[in-house]
Amino acid sequence: MNRNLPNILTTLRMLVIPVFLYYLYLSRVPGQILICLVIFVLASLTDYLDGALARKYNVISNYGKIMDPLADKLLVLAALSGITWLMPYRLPALIFILIFARELIITILREIYKQRGIIVAADKLGKLKTVMQMLGLIAAYSVWAFSSPSPIFVTVITLWFWLVTGITLYSGVNYLRIKA
């Protein structure tokens, strides 16, 4: 196995984000939301795969510890922006703002810690947060790609993302506890 494969997958995930955003906001091709869904699902799978490969072959790197969570955050925020700012979902903007703020603060803290020689890998709660975000986004985009979401489904997605927002904020607390 190529020892750089996990980092290559992380980098590819970063590179597909602008393509996702293009199809979400600029493209007017039929099935553009389905294209977004496929991109998001494949990118989400690379998140699982790069971590599994890195652990299996013991090729954990500082690049991966920093770039993998950053790629996850940017991918999730890109997809979350679509269900926040576009119909049919139009989630409350506060959900996006709180998740964005948490991710920004944690990314800045990670960089500060890195400069001080402290590498903080994602913990179990952070991984749960990412999985819940990705599952909610896959559900929202799946329904959006194939039909018009019912008002009940929009409400369920909204409630899901309020729950995810709470977990997202709580999962950031451990970063604030580190004494650098």
Image (tube, rainbow, N blue to C red):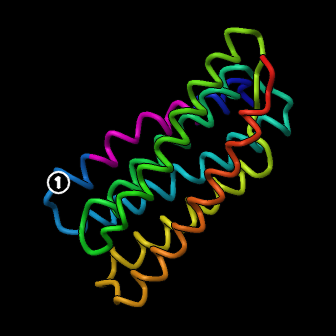
Q: Residue at x 41, y 90 (%)?
A: 152
Q: Could you say which is closer to the camera, residue 107 or residue 44? A: 107
- In the depicted structure, whether residue 63 falls above or below residue 1: above
Vertical position of residue 34 compared to residue 81: above or below: below
Comparing 160 with 134, the one in front is 160
Left or right of residue 78: residue 170: right
Q: Position of residue 138 (x, y in %)?
A: 49, 67
Residue beneath label 1, please?
27
| Residue at 77 percent of width and 34 percent of height | 54
Location of residue 51 with respect to 127 vertically, above or below: above
Name the foreground residue: 35 vs 156.
156
- Please name the amino acid that badge 1 sits on: Ser
Quadrant where the C terminus sits is top right
Q: Quadrant of residue 72?
A: top right
Please state the horizontal and vertical placement of residue 154, each as a whole percent of the image: 39, 81
- In this view, the residue in front, 49 or 178, is 178
Q: Is residue 19 magenta?
A: yes
Residue at left offset 49%, top offset 73%: 139
Graded by Cα atoms within 10 Å as few (under 14), some (14 to 19) or many (20 or more), the crowding at tag 1 reads few
The span shown in magenta is 10-21
- For mark 1, give the secondary structure: loop
**Residue 114 location, x and y as percent?**
69, 15
* Left or right position of 145 against 15: left
Q: Is residue 7 left or right of residue 85?
A: right
Residue drawn 77% across the image and 10% down it: 117
Magenta highlight: main SS? helix
The spot of residue 173 in percent (x, y) is 72, 42
On screen, 113 above or below 19? above
Asked whether 125 falls inside the magenta stretch, the response is no
